[in-house]
Amino acid sequence: MPELPSIRTQMLERLIRAGSDVWQELQQKTGPRHHLFVPCDHRDAYEALRRLRSRAATFLELGSAAGIVTILADMLGYEACGIEIDPWLVQRSIQLAEQFGSRATFAEGSFVPEAYQHEVEHLADDRITITEGASAFAELGLELDDFDLVFAYPWPGEEDWLHTMVRGHARPGAILLTYDSRDGFVETVIGDR
């Protein structure tokens, strides 16, 4: 059995600490306003990405925030992209990638494929995820079905529409990896459409 890819412990800790610094910077920047950014468990994300590396070569993070998971994916050998709607977070992600020598790519805009936009418009008005805006896929020059592994950390109550969107637009055999603060990381293999 081949050895799992890894990142030196010191580098991993530095990256996670840098992500925490971005989180604190964002809290100071936004003040009392709710900023819709909650990081997942980055150490567990690292382990999940290591485990899946032999099954996937391309990685996409939907709502990449500070970019830590996308950068981890790149460091583990994935061709890694992140999509984020907040311009400030996209810029900080790009800066972190450069700081850590990562080739991860970040695009600003909506992670909802254009073909699914009409469906999203009919979702509950109280959803938290921002789905309006220019398509980040156009900026990447790629589509959802170009990726082997798609990662998302959906807001509570928004798991169903996210799963429906990915099932309808990812390639058969792709893996959807989601994070939930109670259940941790969950893998779903996308079946035939």
Image: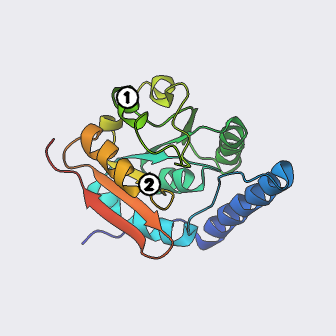
- Residue 186, how many percent across, how many down? 36, 67
Q: Quadrant of residue 87?
A: top right
Nearest to the observer: residue 163 or residue 69: 163
> Farthest residue in the bottom direction?
182
**Height in image: 148 above or below 188?**
above
Amino acid type shown at disc 1:
His
Residue at image point 23% right, 41% down: 171
Nearest to the observer: residue 129 or residue 107: 129
Nearest to the observer: residue 53 or residue 167: 167
Q: Quadrant of residue 52?
A: bottom left
Residue named by callout 1: 118
Residue at image point 49% right, 72% down: 44
Locate residue 133 relative to residue 112 in the image: left or right: right
- Residue 117, how many percent across, how many down? 40, 30
Does residue 5 show up?
A: no
Amino acid type shown at disc 2:
Glu
Which quadrant would the C terminus be assigned to in this image? Answer: top left
Locate residue 164 relative to residue 107 in the image: left or right: left
Residue at image point 66% right, 39% down: 86
- Residue 16, how many percent across, how many down? 66, 65
- Residue 92, how many percent across, how many down? 72, 44
> Farthest residue in the left direction?
192
Mark found first going from the N terminus, 2 or 1: 1
| Mark 1 surroundings within 10 Å by alpha-carbon count, few (fewer than 14), some (14 through 19), many (20 or more) | few
Marks 2 and 1, how far apart at CA: 17 Å
Residue named by callout 2: 158
> Which type of secondary structure does the marked residue at label 1 adopt?
helix
